[in-house]
Amino acid sequence: KQVKHGNQVIADRLCRLPCEVVDFTAGQDCDEAQKRKYRLTYGFLNRFRRELAARPLHKRWGPSHPFYALYNIGPYTFVPHRVAWKRSTKSFAATVLGAVKMPMLGNRLVLANADAMVIDLSSEARAHFVCGLLNSDFARHRIDRSITTKAHRDIISVVPLPRLDRHNDAHVEVVRLSRELHSAVAKNEQKQTDKLQLDLDLIARSILEKMC
């Protein structure tokens, strides 16, 4: 399943396996425990032992951990409403990550890999508000000028993002436009995307210029 904003592909494949969060610092024999509890899943992962053990992050942080260990994962990883963008880019573009409907599996949360930067928001409306402002020409121009090698999490600090005010008509309009832009991009409706982007650029500029 692809999740896109413009030409930016954020995530391209989703896979669901039995899993649980294990605290490696607790001294638990994690590898043996997982072998017993998830025998078939462990067998599947073991087919890729060489590739998984060769990951740079695993070599740096986890030689004493199981070969399938994952890193930089916490409660923030599974927040329902997030904004994500590519880490390696010179042309910033953001997208809202939430749940997608998968055949036979139903609704499943989209998780970004290590090539994407992610910030979590408390609601779907707030996620679209932040995403809409960040995708405006005013914000993207500032961000693109500030990117050196990577677009890390703190890169968006160059844009003075206000809190969403649900009683502010301009704020509500940004949320609406961001939602419609995501829908238009997903349907490859280029004319509608261009029109919505122009509207978003105008309303976002009127908000952000007051914050500078």
Image (spheres, grey):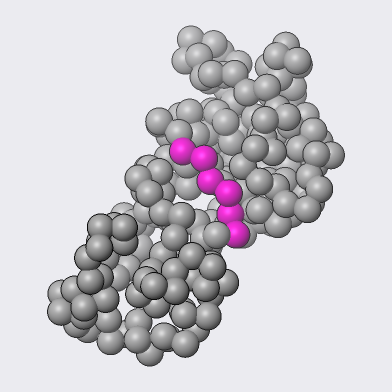
Q: From the viewer's perspective, is 111 left or right of 152? A: left
Q: Does residue 189 appear in the picture of this structure? A: no
- Which residues make up the magenta segment? 115-120
Residue at x-position 19% and y-position 73%: 33
Q: Residue at x 60, y 59 (%)?
A: 115
- Image-based side of 76 in relation to 20, left or right: right
Q: Is residue 190 above or below residue 136?
A: below
Q: Is residue 51 above or below residue 6?
A: below
Return the x and y of residue 94 as percentages of the image width and height.
Answer: 62, 44
Residue displayed at 78% across by 53% down: 149
Relative image position of residue 211 (x, y in whole percent) = 70, 14
- In the figure, residue 138 lies in which quadrant? top right
Q: Quadrant of residue 180?
A: top right
User: What percent of the width, then of the height, locates residue 202?
Assistant: 74, 24
Outermost residue to the right: 145
- Is 117 included in the stretch rendered in magenta? yes
Q: Nearer the viewer, residue 99 or 117?
A: 117
Residue under the image location 47 percent in, 15 percent down:
166
Decide whether the magenta segment is chiefly helix, strand or loop. Answer: strand
* Left-right relation of 142 to 46: right
Residue 8 within the magenta-colored segment of the rendering: no
Is residue 167 among the parts visible in the rendering?
yes
